[in-house]
């Protein structure tokens, strides 16, 4: 990407985070965003149709960063789903502040959807033969939404307590995951 475009997008992303921490997406005006980013409106519209397209890009970039921060050198398997759960929750915790800015309470449904998509994509890159396994997809959705919602809704509980509890739940589902993946593999 051209350095000027990169610099412009970075300025717009930074300004978006600043404004989003104070306002809903619908209340952010392109003019105030451009002023905060020190970019003119024409430049903004060169890159984005509207504020929602920018928001979508910023959200997807953040979720990509979360998923990319999960160590790839560990042996995640359906025999030990707690390990993957722990790593995902630690990655989520690392980016918690930004996540809560972008996905405030009214947008938590979107966060669950994005987390589900990005997490499943990471899993199915490693296990492509399981992509169309309906039972596994249902179980993964349940675990991903549940873990994300638990982590967000229990901000006052120490993170290690939250992670340890979710690990126990996911570990208890381990035999079911293994059974489902063996049946359909």
Image (tube, helix red, strand yellow):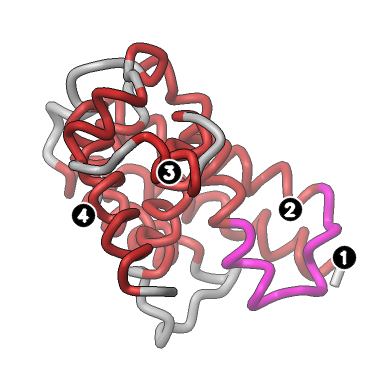
**Which residue is labeled 1 in the image?**
184
Residue at x-position 34% and y-position 19%: 29
Q: CA distance from mark 3 to mark 4?
A: 15 Å
**Which residue is labeled 2 in the image?**
136
Q: Nearer the viewer, residue 106 or 26?
A: 26
| Drawn side of residue 57 relative to residue 92, left or right | right
Q: Which residues are magenta?
A: 120-134
Q: Are marks 2 and 1 in contact (CB under 8 Å)?
A: yes
**Which residue is labeled 3 in the image?**
59
Q: CA distance from mark 2 to mark 1?
A: 9 Å
Residue 28, compared with residue 34, is above or below; it is: above
Q: Secondary structure at mark 4?
A: helix
Residue at x-position 57% and y-position 71%: 79
Quadrant in the picture for residue 161: top left
* Mark 4 closeness class: few <14, some 14–19, many ≥20 residues within 10 Å: few
Number of numbered discs visible in the structure rendering: 4
Q: CA distance from mark 3 to mark 1?
A: 33 Å
Q: Which mark is residue 94?
A: 4
- Residue 146 seen in the current view: no
Q: Earlier in the sequence, mark 3 or mark 4?
A: 3
Residue at x-position 33% and y-position 69%: 69
Q: Nearer the viewer, residue 61 or 121?
A: 61
């Amino acid at each position: 990407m051209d350095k000027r475009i990169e610099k412009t997008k970075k300025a717009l992303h930074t300004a978006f985070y600043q404004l989003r921490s104070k306002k809903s997406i619908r209340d952010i005006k392109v003019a105030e965003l451009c002023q905060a980013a020190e970019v003119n409106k024409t430049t903004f519209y060169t890159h984005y149709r509207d504020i929602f397209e920018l928001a979508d890009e910023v959200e997807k970039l953040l979720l990509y960063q979360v998923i990319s921060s999960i160590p790839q050198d560990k042996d995640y398997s359906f025999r030990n789903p707690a390990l993957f759960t722990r790593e995902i929750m630690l990655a989520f915790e690392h980016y918690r502040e930004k996540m809560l800015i972008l996905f405030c309470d009214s947008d938590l449904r979107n966060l669950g959807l994005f987390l589900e998509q990005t997490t499943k994509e990471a899993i199915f890159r490693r296990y492509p033969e399981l992509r169309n396994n309906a039972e596994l997809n249902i179980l993964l959705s349940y675990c991903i939404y549940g873990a994300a919602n638990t982590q967000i809704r229990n901000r006052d509980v120490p993170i290690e307590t939250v992670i340890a509890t979710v690990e126990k739940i996911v570990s208890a589902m381990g035999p079911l995951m293994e059974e489902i993946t063996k049946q359909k593999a």
